[in-house]
Every structure is written in C-alpha cells, then in structure tokens.
Amino acid sequence: MSDFPKWLLALAGISLLPVLLSPFYLFGASPFGTSDSAFLRFLLYICTQLLWLLPLLLFFFSLDLYRRGFERAGISLAVCSALIAVGGGVCLFA
C-alpha cells in the first residue's frame, strides 16, 4: 500500500462501503422495484447485485491501473467507483 498516495486510497476506499451493505443487497432490498415477470425479476436482481459487486471490482482495477503507471485512468476509475457506490447506497436507502 505504500505505492499509493493516501488520498487515492481514501478515494478508492469509498467503493468498499457497499461490501458492508451487501447483506441489505442480498436479502430483500430491491432498489429498482419488482415485476410480475420472472425474467424481469431476475434482471432486476442481477442489477441489484451489481450495485455492490461492481464498486468492489473497480476498487482493485483502479489501484492496479495506478500501480502500472496509468495514473489518470486509475483515478478516473476510482471516481466512477465511488459514484456508483454512493449512488447504490442512495438507491438502497431511498
């Protein structure tokens, strides 16, 4: 972790918050609503799970890009990950 500046770790760390909220995503929370169709319910379930899984994956990809020397891409990915994490939390508790 000494390869990364503290501000980048703090920015990327925001995207780890959905992991703490994953029980809400896994058991009963439906931020996108429900549907009568089984296929649509399945798609909504997949989208709900992506709200917590995607920021976790982007956390590791952003740090890997920064470590490889693609600083701007790593920072951009960390910002996008943080926005998805915050947006997912807002959708979950709205």
Image (cartoon, rainbow, N blue to C red):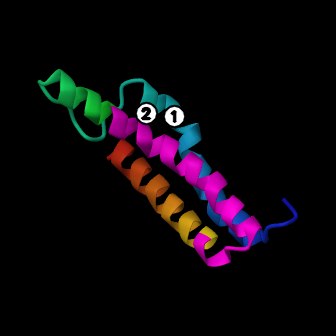
Which SS does the magenta portion mostly show? helix
Q: Front-most of 62 and 8?
A: 62
Q: Does residue 80 lie above or below 72 as drawn?
A: above
**Residue numbers of the magenta segment:** 46-73
Which residue corresponds to mark 2? 25
The mark total stands at 2
- Residue placed at 50% from the left, 29% from the top? 23
Q: Does residue 71 lie above or below 17 as drawn?
A: below
* Res 37 → quadrant: top left
Q: Position of residue 80 (x, y in %)?
A: 49, 64
Mark 2 → mark 1, Cα distance in angstroms? 5 Å
User: Mark 1 packing: few (<14 Cα in 10 Å), some, or many (20+)?
Assistant: some
Discs 2, 1 touching: Cβ within 8 Å = yes
Which residue, as the protein is rendered here, is positioned at the far right?
2
Q: Amino acid at mark 1?
A: Ser
- Residue placed at 19% from the left, 31% from the top? 40
Which residue corresponds to mark 1? 22
Task: Check if residue 63 falls in the magenta segment.
Answer: yes
